[in-house]
Image (cartoon, rainbow, N blue to C red):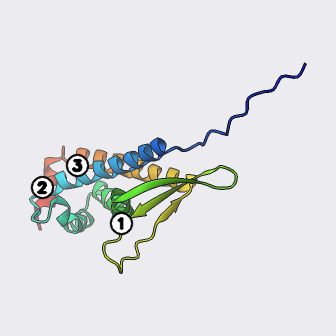
Amino acid sequence: MSETLPLAPAEPRLDLAGAHQWLAQVLVNFAKAEQAIGRLCVSLDLPIKNGPLGSVNELRERLKASDDRRCHMLEKRIARWQMLRPVRHVLAHATLQILFDEKRNPILVTRHLPLDRNDVTPDRVWTEAERAELLRLATNDGRSIHDQIRNLQTDAKLLAALRLP
């Protein structure tokens, strides 16, 4: 006796909810670093007219000028984090769409609303490896910057030195 087995399409490895979860995790980790940097700028009395990140370059200069090794490590981490800020901006203003290739592998596409008719902000295709790498970087940078700043803020002598222009 042969029995017919029911056929079901293969389950995609990435659905829209999973894509939004990835996006949320990346943005939350960017925000952790951003908030920590902002708090440090405020605690150093750096100008915040344009928001607490308006002085991030001044903060980096003060960290570089310090003799403390921890400041140099933090400055390097902030530099890497700053290189990813355009990606954060794009992700914060994107909509997500899942497409599938001929083998039913999911492909994430971020779509952007053009600012005007001359805006050529491209839609972005994200491979699984690229998504994993961006999440890894955002998680590592967010946690590292947050923790390093928390540790620096316990050192009153170092904060006093960093306040000096």
Q: Which numbered circle lies on residue 113? A: 1
In the displayed orientation, state which residue is furthest to the top. 1
Element type at mark 3? helix
> Label 3: how many residues lie within 10 Å, few (<14), some (14-19) or many (20+)?
some
Give the residue pinned by disc 2: 42
The vertical placement of 120 against 63, above or below, is: below
Q: Which numbered circle lies on residue 32? A: none
The type of residue carrying mark 3 is Leu
Element type at mark 2? helix
The vertical placement of 118 against 26, above or below, is: below
Q: Nearer the viewer, residue 103 or 154?
A: 103
Give the Cα distance between marks 2 and 1: 34 Å
Q: Are marks 3 and 2 in contact (CB under 8 Å)?
A: no
Q: Nearer the viewer, residue 17 or 56?
A: 17
Give the residue pinned by disc 3: 152
Q: Nearer the viewer, residue 153 or 38?
A: 38
- Mark 3 vs mark 1, foreground winner is 1
The type of residue carrying mark 1 is Leu
Q: Is residue 84 left or right of residue 16?
A: left
Coordinates of residue 87 in the picture (x, y in percent): 39, 62
Q: Is residue 9 left or right of residue 72?
A: right
Coordinates of residue 118 in the picture (x, y in percent): 36, 81
Query: Dividing the image into 4 quarters, which one contains the C terminus?
Result: bottom left
Coordinates of residue 33 in the picture (x, y in percent): 29, 51
Quarter location, residue 13:
top right
Give the Cα distance between marks 3 and 1: 40 Å
